[in-house]
């Protein structure tokens, strides 16, 4: 018995031909005006660079605020410094990666809690807020920055978990 109708090969060939035709018809600038061919591309790249710069600045500022919280907590509670130092160093590396060389210090906004356990819990909450802020920026970020923000957000979530466990183990 002989097959009739559309085969898979025929459907794929037709789909490829339609896609190729659509791609080729979009290659010209369409209106025939005296607009340089690279002008829309250059404008789009400039806009994307501005969005990336704004997102990096915001993310770096958020990470610097978190780094400031670590510094305050370690200064207020030196006994917790051993457990907090590796996490603080990771946050410092994240801040450096986001800030692209420039980084101003933030003014201390609120002192660390007097109780060590409470201070570590507050630090865990700050880590969660920072991770959430970085995650929220993912949809607007270009691919390379999005990957960086995703890894920093994942590290922040892990830090929050570790800080929560450290708070449970810390004596008041």
Image: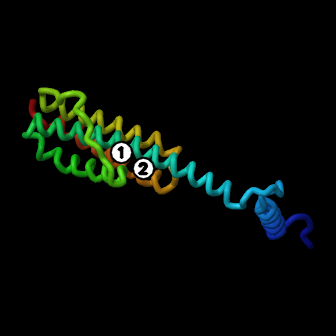
Q: Residues within 10 Å of mark 1 (few under 14, many from 20)?
A: many
User: Do we see residue 11 in this rendering?
Assistant: no
* Mark 2 residue crowding within 10 angstroms, few (<14) / some (14–19) / many (20+): some
Give the secondary structure at mark 2: helix
Q: How is the image coloured?
A: rainbow
- Give me the residue at 52% from left, 52% from top: 49
Helix or strand or loop: what does disc 1 sit on? helix
| Most distant residue in the left direction | 79
Which quadrant is home to the N terminus?
A: bottom right
Residue at the spot 36% in from the left edge and 54% down from the top edge: 100
Q: Is residue 24 visible?
A: yes
52 vs 131, nearest the viewer: 52
Residue 22 in the image: x percent, y percent? 80, 60
Is residue 161 found left or right of 49 in the rendered image? left
The residue singled out by tag 2 in the image is: 150
From the viewer's perspective, tell me whether residue 82 is left or right of residue 65: left
Give whichever of 46, 153 is nearer the camera. 46
| Residue identified by numbered label 1 | 60
Name the outermost residue toward the front: 34
From what the image shows, is residue 13 above or below residue 96?
A: below
Distance from disc 2 to disc 1, alpha carbons, whole Å, reads 14 Å
Query: Which residue is rendered at x = 72% and y = 59% of the image?
Result: 36
Count how many numbered circles sit on residues in the image. Answer: 2
> Foreground: 7 or 159?
159
Which residue is more in the foreground, 96 or 44?
Answer: 44
User: Quarter-wise, where is residue 16 in the image?
Assistant: bottom right
Q: Quadrant of the C terminus?
A: top left
């Amino acid at each position: 018995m002989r097959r009739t109708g559309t085969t898979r090969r025929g459907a794929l060939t037709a789909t490829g031909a339609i896609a190729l035709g659509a791609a080729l018809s979009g290659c010209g600038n369409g209106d025939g005006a005296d607009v340089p061919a690279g002008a829309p591309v250059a404008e789009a790249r400039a806009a994307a660079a501005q969005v990336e710069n704004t997102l990096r600045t915001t993310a770096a500022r958020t990470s610097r605020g978190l780094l400031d919280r670590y510094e305050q907590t370690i200064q207020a509670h030196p006994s917790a410094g051993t457990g907090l130092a590796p996490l603080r160093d990771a946050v410092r590396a994240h801040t450096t990666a986001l800030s692209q060389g420039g980084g101003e210090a933030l003014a201390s906004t609120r002192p660390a809690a007097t109780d060590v356990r409470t201070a570590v819990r507050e630090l865990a909450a700050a880590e969660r807020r920072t991770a959430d802020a970085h995650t929220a920026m993912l949809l607007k970020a270009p691919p390379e920055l999005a990957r960086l923000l995703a890894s920093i957000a994942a590290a922040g979530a892990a830090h929050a978990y570790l800080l929560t466990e450290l708070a449970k183990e810390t004596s008041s």
